Image: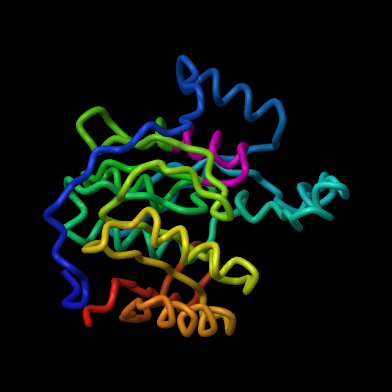
Amino acid sequence: MNRDTPTLLFTHPLASAPVLHQPPNSHQLYRELSSRYDVVESEIVVGDSDFAILRVQDTNVLLDRIDAARFAIDERLPYWADLWLSSIALARYCLEESHMRGTNVLELGCGLGLAGIAAAKAGAVVTQTDYELDALQFCRYNAMRNLSDDQGASQVVHLDWRNPEPIGVFDVIIASDIIYERKNFHAILTTLIQLLHPEGCAVLTDPGRSTAEDFLSTATEYDYAIATTSQDVKMGAKTGVIRQHILSRSRG
């Protein structure tokens, strides 16, 4: 375990949460998704674990489908449909950290769901959340595809971090590549305060964007202590240096 990671020996049952209706099986969900998207399944290797992740084959096509009226309200872009190096790094963390087993984990902005699925594979009870309903459907399918009955549980919940529902208190909150817009900093940090156990930690990964430095500076104003490390990540032809930030509440 990273020496900067708190020891997590506590668990908390989830409160009532708006979980999306569970379809009968993964085949039905696959048919529904493939009827609306050109999908492809990618084999992703993280450490000693293999994942089969269903994704949109060409995310550029989704840009042509953006509804101008909805974009004018909250500038929604289909970031959820891509598989990012930051999610690979976060999945690796979840698989390698022994303290994940038996904990309640919340994933913010789950997208296709790789990191949260890795946490469940490591034995955590995972709630994966996103603002985009289609992201939750892909995430749900990928969880069905990759998790066996004897591994940690996973559920998907719709969550808007600008106005988060009281869905429980979590030992660990994870997120990959969500700290890129300054307008979301306050909402993200407020969500952490509301949903993270005081003795827990949040683990965020990012590809070294300059905005991340501003987020971390803002986080210290919210009384968070931060430990940052870096790692090289490769996925096919993509390579990059991904930073991992562990946030815990400062002790006065």
Does the magenta stretch mainly form a helix, a strand or a loop?
helix
Q: Residue at x 46, y 14 (%)?
A: 24
In the image, 167: left or right of 82? left
The residue located at (64%, 56%) in the rendering is 79
Query: Percent position (x, y) of residue 185?
Result: 55, 70
- Number of marks in the rendered image: 0
- Residue 48 appears at what percent x and percent y? 26, 55
Q: Quadrant of residue 7?
A: bottom left
Quarter of the picture containing the C terminus is bottom left
In this picture, residue 212 sits left or right of residue 93: right
Where 87 sits versus 21, above or below? Answer: below
Q: Is residue 227 above or below residue 235?
A: below
In the image, farthest residue toward the right? 68
Image quadrant assignment for residue 29: top right
Q: Nearer the viewer, residue 189 or 80?
A: 189
Where residue 15 sits, quadrant-wise, is top left
Q: Which residue in the rendered view is the most extreme toward the front?
A: 252
Between 216 and 81, the residue placed more toward the observer is 216
Residue range (magenta): 130-142
Name the quarter where the N terminus is drawn. bottom left
Which residue is depicted at the point 35% across and 76% down? 224
List x then y, in percent, for residue 19: 46, 30
